[in-house]
Amino acid sequence: MRADLILRALARRHTSDIFLTEVKTGPTLTASKGELRRIDALVIKQSWARPLFTAYEVKVSRSDFLNDDKWTEYLPYCHRFYFACPAGLIQRDEVPDPAGLAWVDPDTLEVSVRKAARSRM
């Protein structure tokens, strides 16, 4: 399953929210080389009283998930963080706290979620 299909499924799940892809963690012009990270998808719940920022890191291979040591750098930019992958690629007990897991069914593009812990940012 390709990353763009996972992003499409996530966008469909968040139709009433602001859905952004490839979001940098700071301004490009003032950043040093290698300083910025890029969040695969950032969702902003449309609410003046209680906005909620949810970040997704898309994984399409086990090796990509197992070798990812940068995901914790996204946590200051979101209230909730999820790994998003094809269903079954990552097991629920493999996901470290406080992250959640979003499985995308490759046939239907339906998303099922193990909730992430909410942080205060």
Image (cartoon, rainbow, N blue to C red):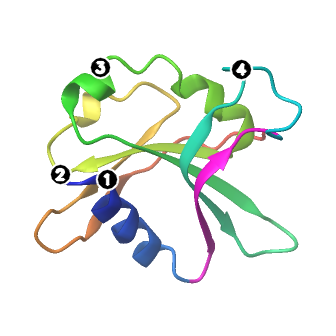
Name the residue located 44 percent from the left edge and 49 percent from the top edge: 115
Between the residue at mark 2 and the residue at mark 4, the CA separation in whole angstroms equals 35 Å
Between the residue at mark 4 and the residue at mark 3, the CA separation in whole angstroms equals 25 Å
Name the residue located 32 percent from the left edge and 40 percent from the top edge: 59
Between the residue at mark 2 and the residue at mark 1, the CA separation in whole angstroms equals 13 Å
Q: Which of marks 3 and 4 precedes in the sequence?
A: 4
Residue assigned mark 4: 33
Magenta stretch: residue 18 in it? yes
Q: Is residue 11 above or below residue 69?
A: below
In the image, 38 versus 87, the foreground residue is: 38
Q: Relative to residue 48, is residue 73 drawn left or right?
A: left
Between the residue at mark 2 and the residue at mark 3, the CA separation in whole angstroms equals 16 Å
Q: Which of marks 1 and 4 precedes in the sequence?
A: 1
Residue 66's tag is: 3
Residue assigned mark 1: 3
Q: Closer to the observer: label 2 or label 4?
A: 4
Label 1: which secondary element: helix
Q: Closer to the observer: label 2 or label 3?
A: 3
Residues drawn in magenta = 16-26
Label 4: which secondary element: loop
The disc labelled 3 sits on which kind of residue? Leu
Residue assigned mark 2: 87
Crowding at mark 2 (Cα within 10 Å: few <14, some 14-19, many 20+): some
The disc labelled 2 sits on which kind of residue? Ala
Q: Which of marks 1 and 2 precedes in the sequence?
A: 1
Where, by quadrant of the figure, is residue 62 drawn?
Answer: top left
Chief secondary structure of the magenta portion? strand
